[in-house]
Each structure stands twice: as structure tokens, then as C-alpha cells.
Amino acid sequence: MRIKETALSACVVAVVLGGTAACTPDGDGPPANASAAPTKVAGTVCRNGDYTWFNVDERDVLTGVAEKEKVTRKGATLTHKLMPLHTPRTAVTFEKGARGDAKAALRSLAVLIGEASADDHGGSLEFSDVRRPAPDLDSGSTSIDGVGTVVQYAWVEQVTADFRYTCGSGEPVTGRATSWVIDGSGILKCSTPMKEAKEGEPALTAARLSCGPDSPAAKT
């Protein structure tokens, strides 16, 4: 799993914050297992076919936020726990046609977004593990080198996409896949505006929820 860190002026400490929410335009993704010949196993959908991807959406999602906490001395340990807001999952939903291979679909999506190469098909990635646990929001104590009213938060970069799977002469299979590629956490100061933040960013959403919509941190 990759961890991405970015410093924001609104933070008391270095904030682990991803890029802005973004959606890629609709389009065809590269086929998975392009060099393998289609095979059919009794009772299952044809294997080694082609995935075509649509509506690929990659965005940062706030997964947890704590109540604002007043810190009066440097080096203090924060005591407010993160409250879960969104539990990320790794899953594939088959909407039309025979039930396909969930792991193969996720491997193909991993190749499409650059999380795996076409040679390894993302076989060892957590991204394609449907039993992958959600990130732990209670991962230990956090101390900060500053004073003021602060908020802790956590986020993931979530990936969701629709697909159409074709193989041999069988009927196409359609569905949707979702997983995540990054998880991180951060601390923001309620009294400091986030001038560079954009709508939908986890830090800005956390500020509006815990600092309040009229706080300096909640305004861009």
C-alpha cells in the first residue's frame, strides 16, 4: 500500500493529505491477460477475456474525523478518537451476465490505473484482495508540536469503475469494481484557513464537520 503525504498551511503538523478529487473521462481500458487464449471451465464464465472500463473515478474520501480538541502545550498527546464516517471496501458487483472472477477484475483495474504492470496483472496487490481489511482508525496515540484547537482526520484514495467483460463467444458480463490505493491521516488547525484546499478534499470536509462551517479552516 502506498502512503502519500502533503503539507498544508492549515496544519499544526505535517498533514498526510492526498491530491484533489478527480474523475478520469470515460474510455476504454487496456485488456487484461491480452496474451492468454480464452479458456472455459465447466460451470464458470470464460477466462482470460478482455475488460473494458468506463466511468473510472479516483477520489479522496474522508473515512474518520475526531471532535475538535484544544491543545494548550507543545508535545501534548491528542485524546479524542476518530469517529468512522466511511468504511472503504474492496469488492466487485456483477450486474449482468454470469458471475465472473472478482480478483481478475480488480487486477485488470489495477493495471488500468497504474497500480500494477500488465506482466504481473497485480497478482500480489492488496488492491485486488476482496478480504482486505479497512484501515484501522485507532492506530495509536498522536502528539503535536503546537497549540490551538485542532482536529484529527483520516482518508483513503478510493477507486471505483464500471466494466464490461467479454470472452470467446459467451455473453458479456458487466459490473462495478471498487478498492483503494492510499490511506492517510492528518491534523488541521481550526483557526488557520486552507487557502489551497478545494471542494471535496478530506481536510476541508473535516474542518467543516468538527471546527464548524464558520471557522477559518472551513473556508477556502
Image: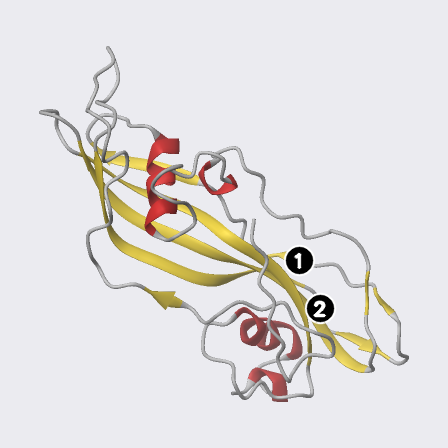
What numbered label is drawn on residue 67?
2
**Which residue appears at 74% of the width and 51% of the height?**
139
Give 182 or 48, whichever is nearer the viewer. Answer: 48
Amino acid type, label 2:
Glu
- Above-or-below relation of 67 to 140: below
The alpha-carbon separation of the residues under discs 2 and 1 comes to 8 Å
Given the current orientation, which residue lies at the most extreme top position? 42
- Above-or-below relation of 203 to 103: below
- Above-or-below relation of 209 to 46: below
Q: In which quarter of the image is residue 116?
A: top left
Which secondary structure, mark 2?
loop
What numbered label is drawn on residue 91?
none
**Which residue appears at 28% of the width and 26% of the height?**
99
- The image position of residue 192, as x and y in percent, is 66, 88
Q: Marks 1 and 2: in contact by CB < 8 Å?
A: yes
**Which residue appears at 69% of the width and 65% of the height?**
66
- The image position of residue 9, as x and y in percent, is 64, 85
Q: In which quarter of the image is residue 191?
A: bottom right
Left or right of 108: which side holds 191? right
Amino acid type, label 1:
Met
Q: Earlier in the sequence, mark 2 or mark 1?
A: 2
Residue under numbered circle 1: 83
Q: Specify few, some or many for label 1: CA neighbours under 10 Å numbering under 14, 14-19, or 20 or more.
A: some
**Which residue appears at 58% of the width and 69% of the height?**
17
Q: Specify few, some or many for label 2: CA neighbours under 10 Å numbering under 14, 14-19, or 20 or more.
A: some
- The image position of residue 87, as x and y in percent, is 54, 49
Q: Residue 215, can we see it?
A: no
- The image position of residue 49, as x and y in percent, is 21, 31
Left or right of 105: which side holds 71? right
